Image (cartoon, rainbow, N blue to C red):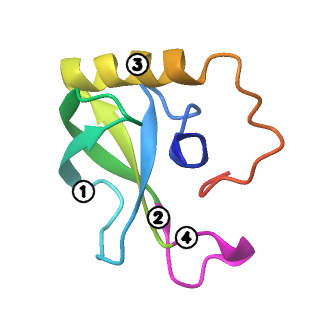
Amino acid sequence: MLNANYMPFVKGGGIFIPTEKTFELGDEVFLLLTLLEDPERFAITGKVVWINHRTTPGGRQMGVGIQFSGVEGANLHKKIDALLAGYNRSDQLTNTM
């Protein structure tokens, strides 16, 4: 699930959040995230940089992509990169690209 929602192509890292709430590109958001079974929580701010509408082609889930910002965002980006190191993304569909 983390692999399908991570957005490594976004400068500073980003993550796709499935939601039916309406957002606009550039909206500032606050997220509280936990990764896999790690008890550490990341409280980060970010900006909406991707939107999958209900009608997005390819059967992708409705939601938004959030670009990480701030020190906690940088820490989260490093943590996700470490968790997914060596994982081949090319054979799995994602919610973005």
* 12 on left or right of 47: right
Q: Residue at (51%, 15%) from the top-left corner?
A: 82
Q: Residue at (60%, 48%) from the top-left corner?
A: 4
- Give the mark nearest the N terminus, 3 or 2: 2
**Disc 4 residue type (three-letter):** Gln
Q: Which residues are magenta?
A: 51-61
What mark, if any, has residue 61 been given in the picture? 4
Asked if labels 1 and 2 touch by Cβ distance under 8 angstroms, the answer is no
The residues bearing labels 4 and 1 have C-alpha atoms spaced at a distance of 20 Å
Element assignment for label 2:
strand
**Residue in the foreground of this view, choosing between 73 and 84:** 84
Q: Position of residue 16 (x, y in %)?
A: 45, 52
* 8 on left or right of 58: left
Q: Residues within 10 Å of mark 2 (few under 14, many from 20)?
A: many
The residues bearing labels 3 and 1 have C-alpha atoms spaced at a distance of 24 Å
- Give the mark nearest the N terminus, 4 or 2: 2
Report which residue position mark 2 lands on. Answer: 51
Q: Residue furthest right?
A: 91
Asked if labels 4 and 3 touch by Cβ distance under 8 angstroms, the answer is no
In which image quadrant can residue 37 be found? top left
Q: Residues within 10 Å of mark 4 (few under 14, many from 20)?
A: many
The residues bearing labels 2 and 1 have C-alpha atoms spaced at a distance of 11 Å
In which image quadrant can residue 56 be found? bottom right
The residues bearing labels 4 and 2 have C-alpha atoms spaced at a distance of 10 Å
What mark, if any, has residue 27 been given in the picture? 1
